[in-house]
Image (cartoon, rainbow, N blue to C red):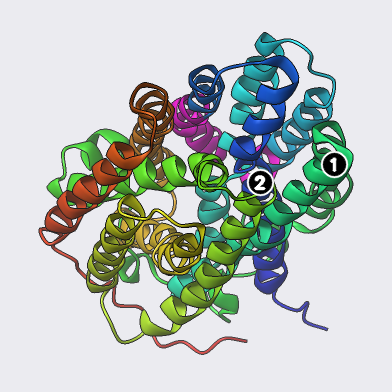
């Protein structure tokens, strides 16, 4: 009897892994207020710890990409998810600021580098070619669900039982649910179980697939840079708002748990947008969708920069959510279709490095500008300007569709 195609189960595990990875890594800003109140650590210092996290996993993206290309995604995903879980358990014991820098800034950053979007995208790209945009969108919905569930949960735990229990619960989720799922289900490549991408009866011919090229060749391509520069503006704005929105909500008179609720609302809007993106990618070019999302997010930040009431943050959360995480599978698919899936770990890893350097700058500048000006207005205006630039650069992308064979799946 023919074994059922493993691809859907692999996508399910990547969904779960992204749910845990992003759910944990994006909670950093929610711990600012309780840590500041408990130990009198200032906002700029705490922002530096999150920036260190961003830089750590950004710098390690190309390294993790090469490890994936050499040893397979399962090996990297398992070790990285394990490290993230342990890092959060350790964070529940912190009493000194250096511990927050080490456990969250360094250890969590290393773990996220190997079980975040890049690693999971490469894994899905190995299992799917023709259905790649749709399956990347489906797996990436785990990012939204992780925020929708884990960010509000973190806020409630902090408000009701303290920040230590929040760290413990999040770390346990990674260790007891995510890690075993990867170990029991995932295979790095369909060839390992005698199957072909997309569940095809016969493997795609080499002539039908985009040629996999080296990282130096990709870096010499204008296509890579027009795609990556737009992605960079995504990183700057994404992590600035995810880290600092809870503090901004608190500044406007919201409670400790409001930041998590707003981020959860954004995640819900993003999940809906992610599903529609998967459907729209069948009829609209990825370039067109990216231009729309960058433009919409710029408008959202203009609204946020001029907001003075808590109620206005709910509208921002919805519009921002719609235009946030769907960008990731679109960029991943653009790079995979042009440069090939076989060597995509190192190429996509470098794109994520650029993304995360910008993210670290956004997180730090958000805290720095808030500390020195007394508000977040300048930080939010910088996001709007950069997204406008990202929209213009994306217009220069010369997108080419990959033509795939019409062989029917088994």
Dot 1 alpha-carbon crowd within 10 angstroms: few under 14, some 14 to 19, many 20 or more: many
Label 2 close to label 1 by CB (< 8 Å): no
Residue depicted at 89% across the width and 46% down the height: 176
Task: Point out the stretch of residues depicted in magenta.
Answer: 54-76
- Quarter of the image for the C terminus: give it: bottom right
SS class of the residue under badge 1? Answer: helix
> Do we see residue 191 in this rendering?
no
Q: Position of residue 249 (x, y in %)?
A: 54, 48
Q: Disc 1 marks which residue?
A: 175
Is residue 88 in sight in this rendering?
A: yes
Q: Is residue 246 magenta?
A: no
* Picture residue at 57% right of the left edge, 48% below the top: 253
Sequence order check: which comes first, mark 2 or mark 1? Answer: 2
Kindly state the secondary structure of the residue where label 2 is placed: helix
> What mark, if any, has residue 119 been given in the picture?
none
Quadrant in the picture for residue 282: bottom left
Displayed quadrant of residue 92: top right
Which residue is nearer to you in this view: 5 or 113? 113
Q: Which residue is mark 2?
A: 21
Question: On screen, 206 above or below 256?
Answer: below
Q: Residues within 10 Å of mark 2 (few under 14, many from 20)?
A: many
Task: Identify the residue at horizontal 37%, vertical 83% (top origin).
Answer: 280
């Amino acid at each position: 009897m023919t074994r059922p195609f493993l691809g859907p189960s692999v996508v399910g595990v990547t969904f779960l892994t992204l749910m845990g990875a992003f759910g944990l890594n994006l909670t950093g800003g929610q711990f600012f207020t309780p840590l500041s109140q408990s130990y009198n650590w200032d906002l700029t210092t705490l922002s530096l710890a999150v920036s260190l996290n961003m830089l750590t996993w950004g710098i390690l993206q190309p390294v993790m990409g090469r490890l994936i290309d050499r040893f397979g995604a399962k090996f990297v995903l398992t070790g990285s998810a394990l490290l993230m879980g342990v890092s959060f358990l350790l964070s529940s014991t912190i009493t000194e600021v250096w511990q927050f820098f080490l456990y969250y800034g360094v250890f969590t950053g290393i773990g996220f580098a190997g079980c975040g979007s890049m690693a999971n995208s490469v894994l899905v790209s190995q299992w799917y070619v023709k259905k790649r945009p749709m399956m990347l969108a489906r797996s990436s919905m785990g990012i939204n669900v992780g925020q929708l569930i884990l960010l509000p949960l973190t806020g409630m735990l902090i408000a009701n039982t303290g920040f230590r229990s929040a760290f413990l619960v999040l770390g346990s989720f990674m260790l007891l649910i995510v890690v075993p799922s990867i170990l029991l289900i995932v295979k790095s490549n369909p060839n390992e179980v005698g199957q072909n991408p997309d569940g095809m009866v016969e493997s795609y011919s080499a002539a039908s697939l985009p040629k996999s090229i080296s990282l130096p060749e990709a870096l010499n391509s204008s296509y890579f840079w027009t795609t990556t520069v737009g992605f960079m503006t995504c990183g700057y704005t994404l992590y600035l708002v995810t880290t600092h929105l809870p503090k901004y909500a608190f500044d406007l008179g919201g409670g400790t748990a409001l930041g998590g609720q707003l981020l959860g609302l954004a995640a819900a809007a993003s999940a809906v947008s992610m599903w529609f993106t998967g459907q729209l990618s069948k009829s609209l070019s990825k370039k067109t969708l990216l231009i729309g999302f960058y433009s919409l997010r710029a408008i959202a930040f203009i609204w946020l920069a001029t907001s003075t009431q808590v109620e206005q943050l709910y509208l921002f959360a919805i519009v921002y959510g719609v235009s946030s995480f769907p960008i990731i599978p679109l960029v991943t698919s653009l790079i995979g279709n042009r440069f090939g899936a076989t060597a995509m770990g190192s190429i996509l890893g470098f794109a994520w490095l650029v993304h995360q350097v910008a993210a670290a700058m956004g997180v730090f500048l958000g805290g720095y500008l808030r500390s020195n000006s007394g508000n977040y207005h300048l930080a939010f205006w910088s996001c709007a300007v950069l997204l406008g630039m990202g929209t213009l650069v994306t217009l220069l992308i010369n997108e080419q569709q990959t033509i795939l064979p019409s062989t029917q799946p088994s």
